[in-house]
């Protein structure tokens, strides 16, 4: 194996290990809507790092971690205190606290550590790729030194989530219920802040601060778009982080660019894909369901109008295709709605081109008009609305009233006519869902 | 006064004018609950700076500024789009824009550095900022931005007030709320881009938030809040620069901490600060008849 490939493999492993730790914790940050706490903590821990470095030196990592976790929790606590006492939103409070702590850290570095090797750049703008040459041997393999902190960190994160699963879940989704059942969501918040500080510090040197922030937020936000359950959200976010590391390092190596940057961009790309194509919350599926809904409403409007027409004439009635299309709405939606009505055998076209209802279409039209008039009557009886304000809400809601609601409305009303004096059609259409077989036979050949 | 060298004067003028400008636009950011948008914007400028450098081929200040502004605006559009079209929450959207744009910038930066041009060195200081390096022309840029933002805010004061406090009401009343909102965000973007090379992202974040949050403790009225936050931003810059020169401290952190100190003092002594409020509440509780003579209940 060539040295270049081996270095790239090391980068993938480092990125994936710290990525999974960050992604799992990030899910809880995103769910609690405190994603930026990750950004804040990664800056707020700086004074803690400096103090830890002063106490322990470069060789002893324990004071570094103790200092960082202390200041990470301090960041979270001060943010809470400042925003609740100082009448400001949480993000403003966080902004004040982390910038001040970071400033203290920078001043400490410039006053106390000027001659010692302590590069703020190295800590905060460290980068995946800098630490790849630094290895310790283990079982005959050259293992990157940072993995000796990253792997235990990952295990700690998994232990944290497994042991406190119920508490984390409850306090993330329903803090009030959590408090009521004796789980302190405040305590969980600070425990989470402590874990985030730990992971942040463990990952700084290995992957750099900007990738840490990306790994905390982006996989979790991606997973939130794709899943509905917490367990699968954690799994998906971990997978996203690993895929990001593999793909990012691959093209980063190919183009010879900074790995931290290429992994971050890959994560952003995965998020963008999820934004557009997520099955339920994606932009595409939302556009599609909006379109399908407006198509249904347009064709239902045609059926209801035709039904009213038949009602007025007392027998069957026909209408020209153009008029129907005008009711369905101009443009592509109207035309598609008419097409839908014809292919589903809700209307049929007479030889002379006029449009009439089939039996199935008549049933649907009847139940729509029934919904409409029931709703008008209900509004009239229970709300003090002037008569000319009844039609519009009914016109909108008739498309959303199902058989069950229709019967409940009918049960509450004793009248047989709507406020405008027209008879409410009876509910025979509701019982026979299937259209008349004749209606299908009448499907016009196009 | 030997420490007030000409160079210090530039820094003093530049930082204080920047403080004033950020105080003004930051007030809107905080009111719209987008306090950390400045932080995200500051990071989102990096790809634009690198692309501008790659396109122009040398360190031309206006080109870099333009690139920074454009990529900042793209960042804002992504932010607004995520809010409008997805269920991604604001906090996550800000974090995503911040990190992904900066990551893209890091990638482009390594492309730029591979080209090995000497003038590419220190391109990242454009984003990370060096206060000591404020030049006279920076002062002009900052002063011009302050005048521009001041003029815009004075012209649209009433419109901005409605949008900042209740954008839904503004929409219902027929104001072009979305466009006004975008104008506000664009003002923030311009200010951030102008200030960034001088002070860096962390100080940008702090200076956008601190003045208006401090001013909030001194007044309850919108117009006075804006004016006060301009004044407070100005004095934060002055005090920070003077202290840092006097005691030979790094300028950026000192300015931030001066602002934090001003804010902390305001919490304790200002008439609408939490301490004054709780004292008033306590006195109301002990002497209920005073409630009518006082005329207004705070909180």
Image (spheres, coloured by chain):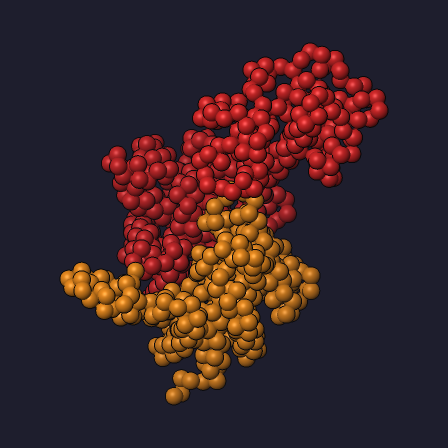
Residue sitting farthest toward the top? A437
Residue sitting farthest toward the front? A421
Query: Across the whole image, how many numbered discs are drawn on residues?
Result: 0
Where does residue A33 sit, x and y in percent of width and height?
41, 45
Question: Is residue A386 left or right of A73 when viewed as pictured?
Answer: right
Q: Nearer the viewer, residue A120 or A399?
A: A399
Where does residue A303 sit, x and y in percent of width and height?
67, 27
Q: Nearer the viewer, residue A44 or A421?
A: A421
Can residue B122 be spotted in the picture?
Answer: no
Q: Quadrant of residue B144?
A: bottom right
Question: Is residue A431 left or right of A196 when viewed as pictured?
Answer: right
Q: Quadrant of the N terminus of chain A?
A: top right
Can residue A327 be spotted in the picture?
Answer: yes
Looking at the image, residue A303 lies above or below residue A257: above
Residue drawn at x 63%, y 70% as measured from the top left: B62
Q: Quadrant of residue B229?
A: bottom left
Q: Quadrant of residue B179?
A: bottom right
Residue sitting farthest toward the left? B286
Where does residue A299 sit, x and y in percent of width and height?
67, 30
Residue drawn at x 61%, y 49% as measured from the top left: A256
Q: Nearer the viewer, residue A97 or A145?
A: A97
Question: Is residue A270 left or right of B255 when viewed as pictured?
Answer: right
Looking at the image, residue A75 lies above or below residue B153: above
Q: Colour of chain B?
A: orange
Residue drawn at x 20%, y 66% as measured from the top left: B290
Looking at the image, residue A32 lies above or below residue B142: above
Residue drawn at x 38%, y 88% as measured from the top left: B1
Where does residue B113 sit, x and y in percent of width and height?
61, 59
Q: Quadrant of the C terminus of chain A?
A: top right
Q: Nearer the viewer, residue B139 or B170?
A: B170
| Chain coloured red in this rendering | A
Residue sitting farthest toward the bottom? B1
């Amino acid at each position: 194996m060539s040295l270049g490939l081996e270095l790239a493999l090391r980068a993938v492993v480092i990125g994936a290990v710290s990525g999974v730790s960050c992604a799992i914790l990030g899910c809880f940050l995103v769910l609690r809507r405190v994603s930026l706490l990750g950004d804040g903590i990664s800056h707020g821990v700086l004074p803690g790092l400096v103090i830890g470095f002063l106490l322990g030196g470069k060789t002893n990592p324990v004071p570094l971690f103790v200092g960082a976790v202390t200041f990470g929790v301090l960041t979270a606590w001060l943010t809470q205190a400042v925003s609740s006492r100082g009448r400001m939103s949480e993000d403003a409070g966080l902004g004040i606290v982390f910038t001040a702590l970071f400033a203290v850290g920078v001043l400490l570095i410039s006053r106390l550590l000027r001659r010692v090797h302590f590069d703020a750049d190295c800590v905060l703008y460290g980068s995946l790729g800098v630490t790849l040459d630094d290895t310790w041997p283990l079982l005959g393999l050259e293992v990157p030194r940072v993995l000796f902190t990253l792997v235990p960190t990952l295990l700690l994160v998994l232990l944290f989530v497994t042991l406190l699963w119920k508490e984390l879940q409850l306090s993330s989704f329903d803090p009030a219920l959590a408090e009521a059942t004796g789980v302190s969501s405040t305590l969980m918040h600070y425990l989470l802040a402590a874990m985030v500080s730990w992971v942040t510090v463990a990952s700084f040197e290995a992957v750099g601060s900007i990738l840490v922030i990306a790994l905390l937020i982006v996989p979790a936000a991606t997973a939130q778009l794709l899943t509905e359950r917490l367990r699968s959200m954690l799994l998906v976010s971990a997978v996203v982080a690993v895929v990001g590391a593999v793909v990012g390092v691959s093209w980063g190596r190919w183009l010879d660019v900074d790995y931290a940057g290429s992994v971050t961009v890959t994560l952003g790309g995965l998020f963008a894909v999820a934004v557009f194509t997520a099955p339920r919350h994606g932009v595409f599926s939302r556009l599609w369901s909006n379109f399908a809904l407006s198509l249904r409403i347009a064709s239902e409007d045609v059926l209801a109008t035709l039904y009213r027409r038949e009602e007025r004439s007392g027998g069957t009635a026909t209408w020209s295709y153009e008029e129907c299309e005008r009711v369905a709405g101009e443009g592509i939606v109207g035309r598609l709605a008419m097409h839908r009505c014809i292919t589903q055998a809700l209307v049929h076209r007479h030889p002379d081109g006029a449009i009439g209802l089939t039996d199935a279409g008549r049933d649907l039209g009847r139940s729509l008009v029934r919904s409409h008039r029931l709703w008008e009557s209900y509004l009239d009886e229970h709300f003090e609305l002037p008569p000319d304000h009844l039609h519009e809400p009914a016109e909108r809601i008739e498309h959303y009233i199902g058989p069950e609601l229709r019967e409940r409305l009918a049960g509450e009303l004793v009248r047989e006519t709507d406020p405008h004096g027209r008879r409410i059609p009876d509910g025979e259409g509701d019982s026979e869902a299937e259209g008349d077989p004749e209606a299908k036979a009448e499907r016009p050949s196009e | 006064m030997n420490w007030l060298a000409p160079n210090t004067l530039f820094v003093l003028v530049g930082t204080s004018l920047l403080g004033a400008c950020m105080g003004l636009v930051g007030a809107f950011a905080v009111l719209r609950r987008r306090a950390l948008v400045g932080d995200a914007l500051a990071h989102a400028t990096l790809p634009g700076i690198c692309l501008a450098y790659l396109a122009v081929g040398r360190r031309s200040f206006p080109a870099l500024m333009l690139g920074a502004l454009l990529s900042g605006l793209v960042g804002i559009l992504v932010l607004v789009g995520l809010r409008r079209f997805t269920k991604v929450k604001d906090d996550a959207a800000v974090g995503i824009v911040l990190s992904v744009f900066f990551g893209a910038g890091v990638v482009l930066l390594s492309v730029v550095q591979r080209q090995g041009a000497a003038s590419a060195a220190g391109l990242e200081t454009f984003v990370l900022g060096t206060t000591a390096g404020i030049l006279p022309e920076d002062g002009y840029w900052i002063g011009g931005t302050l005048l521009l933002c001041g003029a815009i805010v004075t012209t649209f004061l009433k419109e901005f007030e409605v949008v900042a406090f209740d954008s839904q009401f503004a929409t219902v009343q027929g104001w072009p709320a979305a466009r006004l909102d975008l104008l506000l965000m664009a003002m923030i973007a311009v200010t951030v881009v102008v200030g960034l090379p001088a002070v860096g992202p962390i100080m940008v974040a702090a200076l956008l938030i601190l003045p208006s949050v401090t001013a909030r403790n001194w007044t309850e009225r919108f117009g006075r809040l804006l004016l006060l936050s301009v004044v407070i931003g100005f004095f934060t810059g002055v005090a920070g620069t003077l202290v840092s020169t006097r005691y030979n401290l790094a300028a950026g952190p000192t300015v931030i901490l001066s602002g934090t100190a001003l804010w902390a003092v305001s919490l304790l002594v200002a008439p609408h600060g939490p301490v004054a409020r709780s004292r008033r509440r306590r006195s109301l509780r002990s002497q209920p008849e005073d409630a009518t003579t006082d005329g207004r209940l705070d909180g």
